[in-house]
Image (cartoon, rainbow, N blue to C red):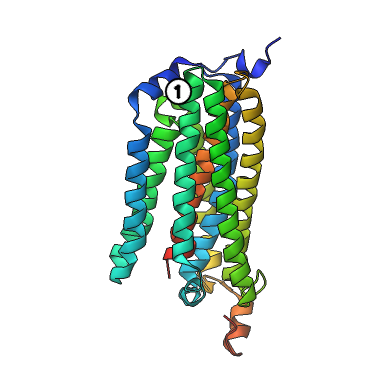
Amino acid sequence: MSEHAEHAEHDTNYVKIWAILLCLLVVSILGPFLGIKIVTLFTAFGIALVKAYLVAKNFMHLNLEPRFVVYLLTTMLVFMLLFFAGVAPDVMKNEGSGWVKPAVHVDAQAPAHH
Amino acid sequence: MRPIANTRSATGIPTGRLAIWWVVASEIVIFGGLLVSYIMYRIAHPEWSEQAANTNVWLGGLNTFVLLTSSLSAVLAHKAAVEGDGPKAAKLLYATCVGAVAFLVVKSFEWTTEITHGYTITSNTFWSFYYTATGLHGLHVIAGAIIMLIVAQTAKKNLELHRVELIGIYWHFVDIVWIFLFPLLYIAK
């Protein structure tokens, strides 16, 4: 087994990380019950990012891999987000400079379906 | 003769592990694309919150607990493999598979309830996203469980122990996908 893996084994208390993840799960479920939008956003999505980081670092041992592995994953994520940023106006707006969504204009004259 | 996946290391890590990182990289685009599409539509359609109110946050939370716990058993299997204890690694992989089955049972119960209440994949775009995202994730859970059973078969004979780490990396990624699906589909009402 690799030196990399042996390192991880000595450095991480997996049960402790799991307990932290469960505490974060409880917070992410209970947070929205307060009914405050900013708290819901933080407890639901902010905590999801923290949980994903903890799993990637401590369970996947991403921090012990060569840097190029992190760059590989980040590049995929960034290019995927760039692609979606490019098409976002088409999805999120009904009209723009020199274009409209015909379907939306037809729908506006009929009762809403959704 | 040892396979090239665990003997060659042209990039500084064994080729088998490099391959699993490539799998994860491609999965980032697959699931990332699906989730970002959902987020764009969700922001553009605030009225979807009425549909999202029909998902069961407690069952979603239970499944998050199940997957986080199965990730723990997967990483403990990796630890056992590092220590050269193949039979223990195999037992922990079987425990992870039990987690996978529990996840699928809860998910089946959810789907059955939702479908019998009239929320199907063709009801509207929210439910189309819901069934596509959770269905694709469920297929990954099934694939992971099958591969884990195969890996456990060799691990219990103390053979090919490096595979325990590789299936673990995949399984933790499946866990991370659910970590994002849960707030998007269950919490954001």
The answer to whether any part of residue A36 appears in the image is no
Q: Measuring from the top left, give residue B115's x and y in whole percent.
A: 64, 72
How dense is the environment of label 1, judged by Cα within 10 Å: few (below 14), some, or many (20 and up)?
few
Position of B161 with respect to B186 (left or right) is right
**Element at badge 1?**
loop
Q: Measuring from the top left, give residue B10's x and y in whole percent.
A: 57, 15
Residue at image position (50%, 69%) is B55
Q: Is residue A20 above or below residue A33?
A: above
Which chain does the residue under circle 1 lie in? Answer: A
Q: Measuring from the top left, give residue B58's x and y in whole percent.
A: 44, 63
Viewer-proximal residue among A16 and B176 = A16
Report the amino acid beneath label 1: Pro
Residue beneath label 1, please? A66
Q: Quadrant of the N terminus of chain B?
A: top right
The answer to whether any part of residue A53 appears in the image is yes
Viewer-proximal residue among A54 and B88 = B88
Q: Measuring from the top left, give residue B6's x and y in whole percent.
A: 61, 17
Q: Is residue B118 above or below residue A75?
A: below
